[in-house]
Image (cartoon, grey):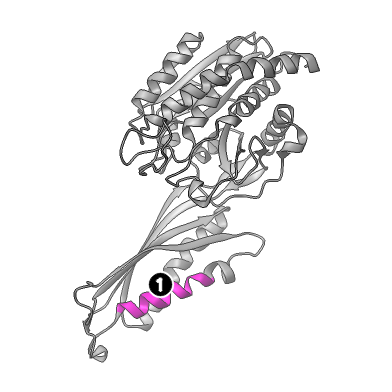
Amino acid sequence: MSDQDKQEQRRKIEALTDELQAIRRDIHKHPETAYEENRTADIVAERLESWGLDVHRGLGGTGVVGTLRKGDSNRAVGFRADMDALFIQEKNTFDHRSVHDGKMHACGHDGHTTMLLGAARYLSESERFNGVLHFIFQPAEEGEAGAKAMIDDGLFDLFPCDAVYGLHNMPGIEAGHIGLRAGPILAASDRWTAEFRGSGGHGSMPHKGTDPTVAAAQFITAMQTIVSRNVDPIDTGAISVGHITGGDPGSLNIIPSDVLVGGTARSFSDSTRDLIERRLGEVAEAIAGAHSCEVDVSYVRGYPATVNWREQTEIATRAAEAAVGAARTDPNLNPLPGGEDFSFMLQQVPGCYAFIGNGFGEPDEFVHAPRYDFNDEIISSGVNYWVELAETELDDMS
């Protein structure tokens, strides 16, 4: 593409900014949580249809797929955005704050949906690609595995893709910059619990019973050695406690008969994930036995690690450099310990997951915080990335 053509592309995308900002703020104002994204899906489907795309609804419950065909190539590429909000009480005071108590777009999915809509709008009038684009608007990313639900409903059977791509906003990265990497970019996200059981007893006579609180306390300390002493230092992982329950605050002189400890585990490789699961059980059993207690350990695997394919990451890097410039593209972004169900799509189809910077803010303006808001200034950069990616993947000269 000539410099003149590129400038014209950016001018046309910039001209869409006011319309796209209005869409984004409307979605933000009316957040919908997992599998309830009916209003958002209506907006998406109506817009896609008005731009001439073929629209399919209902995959994974409330998912929407818009298909755009140009030229004679059968090569097909999927672009995915998530639509769901979170159960968080918004603390912002601007006009587009959530109208639904206890629900808000605190992770920028309103922006993801909007950027992909902007790309569909622009590409519907473009003649610079040859092939098929599937615009995948997914429900229930936030812990409810909407990506898997769409796959199980036949996403890639009904809409075969040679490659699939995702894009997520991220605070702490300069606004409009794009970061990505080949290999693991996000962690597997698992949950675990360990319930220690003893006889309990009177706090003044601990020798008369067995005390699960001491076993639980030693387990919390000992489990920290799983990553530091069992995981290869070249790899990494994280195990954190998020919940402890035992006894009653009204009976502080009673040793409880059971103590529940639970938390999260993160890993970037299958081998480390297996190791963490195995060692949590072994450490809990050993400590419980040392204190004449019993323990039940549960380990529930959530989203797998998000692992980018090398070839598609190279393609996405070229698209990012064309969209925002090489100086604003980081092809070696450090992996992040968050989880993402786009990982299920990458297990089915080659692809790449990238991040676009949302800029810098206060601690309570991070994702999943009550004052978070997607930065409208990066909408055009995100749309440009999707457009460049479409034209790179489906080059009309190929």
**Quadrant in the rendering for residue 212:** bottom left
Task: Please tell me which residue is depicted at 24% across the width and 76% down the height of the picture.
Answer: 256
- In magenta segment, residue 115: no
In this rendering, the count of numbered labels is 1
Q: Nearer the viewer, residue 350 or 383?
A: 383
Give coordinates of residue 395: x percent, y percent: 71, 18
Percent across and percent down for residue 151 are: 45, 31
Query: In the rendering, at what x and y percent does residue 309 appear?
Result: 65, 38
Lateral position of residue 362 relative to residue 102, left or right = right
What is the quadrant of the N terminus in the image? top right
Q: Which segment did they paint magenta?
A: 212-225
Q: Quadrant of the C terminus?
A: top right
Q: Position of residue 162 (x, y in %)?
A: 60, 26
Q: Nearer the viewer, residue 325 or 395?
A: 325
Residue at 49% in and 18% down: 66
Q: In the rendered view, tell whether residue 119 sits above or below residue 356.
A: above
Q: To which residue does mark 1 refer?
A: 284
